Image: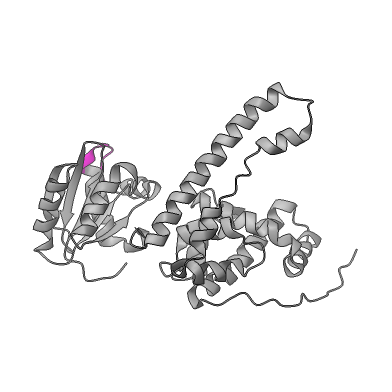
């Protein structure tokens, strides 16, 4: 996030009432107390804080119950960021006391915004195309979940019948509206960059575009890997090193998109060559696929940052000993 903020309001959002704590760069409390979830009250507090200088509003939820404060803050011309719940809980453990109160959570959010800017995530809601795409992706996810539920229920009743019926009932919904939105000028460039890479189709590109945008929020591909949860984690105990393991944290939707694209990339000669080399070195299927996803992440990060299309290269033919 950018520097130069004079006020850091942290909001522990609630359904009917939020709790807000505002700190200055030195950690002095400028505001604190309950905040009704209504536009007039939100505007009153935001306008008061804006008189003190540049404001960065940070929330722990930016959808559903957190949508109104985010919208009002943006309408007031304030910057808005999001502190994921998992990060909030981890940071809260560093503060004295075990009480779980709205006031304490709001203070933790505000203090994290002041001292740990790298833990924040930006909220991209200003692009109309991305906003529409977000709605469609959410609708697509709902349809897929509903189709899976119905399919599993009916499958138990129709076991043994024609398998074509099962294929029809599967979660294979296609949405021409997604194609139409990605073809618009505002999203065309990024979408074409993503889909130029083998293994990334329209739906995967839409998911990546929503989760990372143009990747400008990440300093390096390693930061992107950590956010997605595909960075290797080394587990040690004393003098014992237990090797690298996949992270259990991260953005699950983005992690799934990376893995699906890596699996699809096995049909690409370069991806298949790298995967086969990992298998020849003793890696099991999942481990080799994770390695391929990490390798593709570096390329994808460079493509997004430079707005450069994927360049196909001929895989090197190396002899593999039996």
Q: Quadrant of residue 133?
A: bottom left
Give the magenta part as a residue range: 95-103
Q: Position of residue 308 (x, y in %)?
A: 55, 77
Q: Position of residue 110 (x, y in %)?
A: 23, 54
Image point 39% across, 56% down: which residue?
Answer: 131
Q: Quadrant of residue 116?
A: bottom left
Residue 35 magenta = no
In front here: 297 or 257? 257
Furthest residue toward right: 322
In front here: 265 or 217? 265
Relative vertical location of residue 124 with respect to residue 96 in this rendering, above or below? below
Residue 90 shown left or right of residue 53 in the figure: right
SS majority, magenta: loop
Relative vertical location of residue 164 with respect to residue 94 in this rendering, above or below? above
Residue 37 shown left or right of residue 52 in the figure: right
Residue 254 shown left or right of residue 121 in the figure: right
Say if residue 238 shows up in the picture. Answer: no
Say if residue 291 shows up in the picture. Answer: yes
The colour scheme used to paint the residues is: one colour
Residue 102 magenta = yes
Image point 78% across, 58% down: which residue?
Answer: 282
Image point 46% across, 70% down: which residue?
Answer: 185
In front here: 150 or 51? 150
Q: Position of residue 164 (x, y in %)?
A: 76, 36
Q: Position of residue 13 (x, y in %)?
A: 26, 43
Q: Quadrant of the C terminus?
A: bottom right
Q: Quadrant of the N terminus?
A: bottom left
Image point 62% across, 55% down: which residue?
Answer: 259
Relative vertical location of residue 66 with respect to residue 223 in this rendering, above or below? above
Relative vertical location of residue 171 with respect to residue 120 in this rendering, above or below? above
């Amino acid at each position: 996030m950018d520097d130069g903020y004079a006020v850091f309001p942290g909001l522990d959002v609630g359904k009917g009432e939020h709790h807000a704590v505002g700190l200055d760069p030195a950690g002095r409390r400028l505001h604190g107390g309950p905040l009704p979830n209504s536009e007039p009250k939100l505007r009153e507090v935001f306008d008061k804080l804006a008189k003190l200088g540049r404001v960065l509003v940070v929330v722990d939820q930016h959808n559903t119950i957190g949508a109104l404060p985010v919208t009002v803050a943006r309408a007031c011309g304030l910057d808005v960021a999001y502190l994921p719940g998992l990060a909030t809980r981890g940071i809260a453990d560093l503060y004295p006391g075990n009480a779980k109160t709205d006031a304490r959570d709001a203070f933790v959010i505000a203090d994290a915004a002041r001292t740990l800017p790298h833990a924040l995530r930006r909220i991209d809601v200003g692009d109309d195309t991305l906003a529409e795409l977000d709605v469609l992706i959410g609708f697509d996810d709902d349809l897929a979940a509903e189709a899976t539920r119905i399919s599993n229920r009916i499958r138990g009743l129709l076991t043994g019948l024609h398998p074509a019926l099962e294929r029809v009932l599967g979660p294979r919904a296609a949405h021409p509206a997604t194609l139409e939105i990605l073809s618009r000028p505002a999203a065309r460039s990024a979408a074409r960059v993503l889909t130029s890479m083998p293994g990334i189709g329209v739906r995967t590109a839409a998911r990546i575009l929503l989760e990372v945008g143009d990747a400008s929020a990440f300093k390096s591909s390693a930061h992107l890997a950590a956010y997605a949860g595909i960075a290797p984690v080394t587990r040690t105990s004393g003098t014992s090193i237990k090797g690298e393991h996949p992270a259990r944290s991260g953005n699950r939707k983005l992690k799934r998109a990376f893995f699906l694209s890596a699996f699809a990339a096995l049909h690409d000669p370069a991806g298949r060559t790298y995967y086969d080399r990992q298998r020849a070195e003793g890696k099991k299927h999942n481990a080799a696929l994770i390695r391929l996803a990490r390798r593709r992440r570096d390329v994808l990060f460079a493509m997004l940052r430079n707005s450069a299309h994927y360049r196909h290269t001929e895989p090197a033919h190396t002899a593999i000993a039996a």
